[in-house]
Image (cartoon, rainbow, N blue to C red):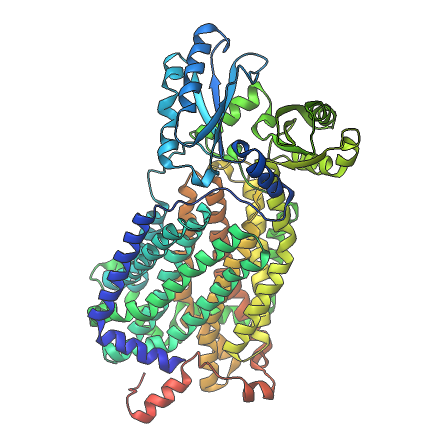
Amino acid sequence: MSTHLYRLARWCFHRRKRVLAVWLLLVVAVIGIAKASGGKTSDTFTVPGTESQHVTSVLEKKLPAASGGSTQVVFAAGSDITAAHYKAAVDQAVTRLSHLPQVAAVANPYQSKAVSPDKRIALATVYYTVPAPEVKSATVDKLEPTVAAAHSAGVEVEFSGTVYPQATSAASPELVGVVVALVILVLTFGSLVAGGLPIVTALFGVIISMMGMTALAAVTDIASAATSVGAMLGISCGIDYALFILSRYRTHLLAGLTPREAAGRAAGTAGSSVVFAALSVVIALCGLAVVGIPFLTTMGLAAAGSVLVALLIALTLLPAALGFAGHRAARFSRLPILRRALPATRTAADHPEKLAGTRWAAWVARRRVPVLVAGVIALGVLAIPAASMNLGLPGASSRPASDTSRRAYDLTTEHLGAGYNGSLAVVAENVTKPAQAQQDAAALAKVPGVASAKVSTVTHGIALISVVPTTGPNDQATTDLVHRIRDDRTAIEADTGTHLLVGGATATNIDVSSKLGSALPVFLVTVVGLAFILLTFAFRTILVPLKSIVGFLLSVGASFGAEVAVFQWGWLGNVLGVDKSQTLSFLPIILLAIVFGLSSDYEVFVVSRIKEHFTKHGDARRAVVLGTGQSARVVSAAALIMAAVFASFLFTSDPIIKSIGFSFSIGVLIDAFVVRLTLVPALMAIVGEKIWYHPRWYGKHVPDPDIEGEKLEASLREEGELTSV
């Protein structure tokens, strides 16, 4: 493989104008397609085969008006909301809302008796003819102007539900991450040119990936979180892959190779590691398909596409860019703060034993046993909060006070009770007369945990009953209530002959969380098994993949613990701007996929360097010290960049994106600095050369991918093209 990558890089370097033109045309094409498609992502999560999804299917067939998206409009007044002047203003707003495009009906709060006991707020519900993802932005944008009459009368109006006007962030989190990454790269390389190259190439990949997702959203459902995950990985992986190849390129230039030869050699060695690292991430993300949940499968495939684009750019566009940069990529800035990077870079090529990373690795190797024990204990302690993980989908209660859905949630909770923010949609089938539905509602009202149960509609042999819990949508008591109704439905149905189904947004979130929790073990076994095969093939040994997997479990356990401590327990909540909430239901699976893929990245980069030295001189402990030392600087920079990109998403107002960004960032930092640069060298120093053991049959029958570039070096020596490096 190293030989093919070597030739590809040299070809791209030589034909750099053609390569750049192709990528520029591709960028223009995907932007044009995305703009023309009009695709829009969705925040609606469904799981086929669950009861809540069955309820949605029944409503789509027999009561379409109740199956589409909905907006809950909260009208709040300083005094009696039923007073004539308030009532006239609210009625006018409701009438105008009913005339908006895609609106099927609007429930007037005075007619549906959705007025709080203290008469301070009234709840109107807007029902759409299409599911929430298909409600056009133009319709959502008209919601606030349409209720202007109520505002003029002194009525506060807030929105919530599956469709509501959401504030846009003033600053792009991706931009914050890119700026931080640029600073780290410039300090790492001591050069503006070298520091800027990974940023430029990564932006190509992000634009292509994001526009591609937008275009696909026009033909299939793509969760909005998928674009954020794709952007995180597109930027971070794109920069990191370019960073590893560029670092080798500069080393070869300083050693006297020509720019074209240096580009080829960098792609043949570091590029091989990048390929296996990217494939590890892609395998982990594609493994989400085994869970059997469409939105998660789409999210995984979309994110995997972003990583593949980043890989292709690193192997083709980056060598072309190096053709334009030439020797300038190895020149150092005259600024004193940047020139400090010069000695470290040259030392990496000439005297690796003098590197700070080498001194750290030597210290770890000398104290390998206590370091290993202390590190494992520390990560184990950090993982303890994970035992209290409570899965769910954070709702309006976890959003900032500036968000209209949070204000609507607080008003509803204060005047009506938290349960009104997450009522259950109970469908009674086999209904032949309204009296049956009323009897079912009366029985449901007696179930512990139910505040009220009212029949909304009876039609086409079904009845829709709105059941309001006494607790909020994210409370464990509400989850218990859903299970209680489903478990006891036989007794509730006994006297009416109907069949009850529990659905609605709250029940859907509960079903999604349950499905994801049960799918976690299957996903973990599948991804770990596939990645074990890939790493075994890459390093031609069994112990290295096993070590990598154990390290990953430590990293992800500690990440889960930190996530629970911050987002469920509220530690550092004021600092990060988050309120206590449940752990995002699909976060554990996504985090497992991402952290496993990225941990394999760092494993490949560090261990391939160690194996490179072991192959040369056969001293296992010295190889650990020198290999870790030479990779420590670039791995540290890569991890800091990736963590910075993930952490930049903490600046969004969306609690879902905040939790994803925080968990990814913590996971990367722990895995890179604690596991790969500390525990891995300690363990490898203890095991010694036995770490490279593999059965004879394996070495005989399994192809060697030449991840360290040994065959490439031998080939170039024979051709007389390789100078002393």
Compare residues 66 and 537 and report the one nearer the observer: 66
Q: Which residue occupies 27% across, 80% down?
A: 261
Compare residues 381 and 602 and report the one nearer the observer: 602
Q: Position of residue 314 (x, y in %)?
A: 34, 67
Name the image quarter holding residue 358.
bottom left
Q: In the rendered image of this protein, does residue 215 appear above or below residue 247?
A: above
Q: In the rendered image of this protein, does residue 617 appear above or below residue 254?
A: below
Q: Which residue occupies 24% across, 74% down?
A: 13
Q: Residue furthest top?
A: 84
> Could you tell me which quadrant the C terminus lies in?
bottom left
Q: Residue furthest bottom?
A: 718
Compare residues 29 and 1 and report the one nearer the observer: 29
Judge left or right: residue 319 versus residue 536: left
Q: Position of residue 129 (x, y in %)?
A: 47, 34
Name the image quarter holding residue 627.
bottom left
> Could you tell me which quadrant the N terminus lies in?
bottom left
Q: Position of residue 309 (x, y in %)?
A: 37, 63
Q: Which residue occupies 44% across, 52% down?
A: 229
Residue 369 visible somewhere in the drawing: yes
Residue 255 visible somewhere in the drawing: no
Compare residues 524 and 576 and report the one nearer the observer: 524
Q: Position of residue 44 (x, y in %)?
A: 50, 42
